């Protein structure tokens, strides 16, 4: 990741990446350019595609490479990020667990109170459904 020191001197409002962002970026940078599905090398590799997602410690933004094999992002797979999910795997897991134990309205309030992550009712419901479908796929695969 390039040094932002000179940019920060020009615009002091730009914050340096948090330790969590640096750790996620390091993991994304270490991901080899291989398709996470078929394990073949990716062609037409391009860099610096931004991805933001929320975790229980706040928002994280990182940059990752993308390559062609149906345009896959290997770093997303390594980090456990679903294609359209805007939340970390841990937040998705917490949302699914809470939604399975109580009404979605209450689950949203409890998640906000415990973690500070504000998940609207509709998003929480969608994440819970996505996790349920994922669990069913894993169970079918194991059987």
Image (cartoon, rainbow, N blue to C red):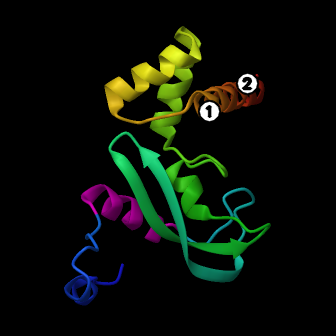
Q: Residue at x 24, y 82 (%)?
A: 8
Instruction: Examine the image and state in which quarter residue 20 appears.
Output: bottom left
Magenta residues, as a range? 18-31
Residue 62 at x, y = what percent? 45, 66
The quarter of the rendered structure image containing the N terminus is bottom left
Q: Nearer the viewer, residue 87 or 24?
A: 87
Q: Check residue 59 in the rendering and tell me which mark sits there, or answer none.
A: none
Residue 73 seen in the figure: yes
Residue sitting at 63 percent across and 64 percent down?
73
Residue in front for this viewpoint, 91 or 59:
59
Label 1, secondary structure: give it: helix
Q: Can I make out residue 30 in this image?
A: no
Question: Tag 2 or tag 1, which sits nearer the N-term?
Answer: 1
Is 23 part of what is drawn in magenta?
Answer: yes
Left or right of 99 on screen, residue 126: right
The prevailing secondary structure element of the residues shown in magenta is helix
Residue 136 circle label: 2
- Which of discs 1 and 2 lies nearer the camera? The answer is 1
For residue 66: magenta?
Answer: no
């Amino acid at each position: 990741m390039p040094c932002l020191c000179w940019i920060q001197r020009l615009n002091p409002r730009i914050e340096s990446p948090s330790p969590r962002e640096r750790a996620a970026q390091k993991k994304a940078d270490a991901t080899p350019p291989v398709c996470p599905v078929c394990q073949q090398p990716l062609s037409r590799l391009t860099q610096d595609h931004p991805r933001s997602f929320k975790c229980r410690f706040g928002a994280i933004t990182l940059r990752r490479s993308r390559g062609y094999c149906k345009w896959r992002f290997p770093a997303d797979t390594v980090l456990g990020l679903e294609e359209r999910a805007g939340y970390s795997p841990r937040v998705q897991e917490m949302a699914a667990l809470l939604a399975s134990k109580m009404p979605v309205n209450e689950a949203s309030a409890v998640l906000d109170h415990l973690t500070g992550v504000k998940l609207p009712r509709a998003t929480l419901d969608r994440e819970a459904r996505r996790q349920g479908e994922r669990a069913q796929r894993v169970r079918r695969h194991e059987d």
